Amino acid sequence: MSDTISSDSSAISVSSPFYIGSSDNPNSILVSTVFNGIGFQYWKRSMILSLSAKNKLRFVDGSITPPAINSPAHSNWHRANSMVICWILNSLNKTIADSVLFLPTASEIRNELH
């Protein structure tokens, strides 16, 4: 599958990991329990299932790398990565979220949480 996507967001296929649906919201909470430092494996599994269902797990596992800054796909990658970061931050308590807030990619946040 190619991740080369037009810079026109209306051209993104719904099967693309760059696709952001109309119901996707940066304020959404994907898991029922906010991670507070206890029960990491339960929280992690819940996040994996939720992100997988939204076709965004590849942003977290690092298998989608940022396109070159001058690539037409960069803005779409950046937008989707930012959405995933918001979802992760919303699933963490404030102290933990604050500790990873300035990491630039969902993958880097994942690595730090591990």
Image (cartoon, rainbow, N blue to C red):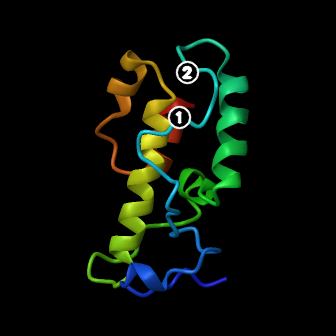
Q: Is 112 in front, or is 87?
A: 87
Above or below, comparing residue 61 to residue 87 in the picture: below
Above or below, comparing residue 103 to residue 112 in the picture: below
How crowded is the residue under tag 2: few (<14 C-alpha within 10 Å), some, or many (20+)? some
Q: Is 89 in front, or is 100?
A: 89
- State the residue position of label 2: 34
Task: Name the spot of residue 89 as percent of width and height, x first.
Answer: 43, 34
Label drawn at residue 61: none
Q: Looking at the image, is mark 1 or mark 2 earlier in the sequence?
A: 1
- State the residue position of label 1: 29
| Residue that appears at 40% across and 72% down | 76
| Residue that appears at 57% across and 68% down | 17
The amino acid type of the residue labelled 1 equals: Ile
| Residue that appears at 47% across and 86% down | 11
- Locate the C terminus by quadrant: top right
Q: Could you say whether the residue bearing mark 1 is in a helix, strand or loop?
A: loop
The amino acid type of the residue labelled 2 equals: Val
| Residue that appears at 61% across and 74% down | 14
Q: Is 38 in front, or is 32?
A: 32
* CB-based contact (under 8 Å), mark 1 and mark 2: yes
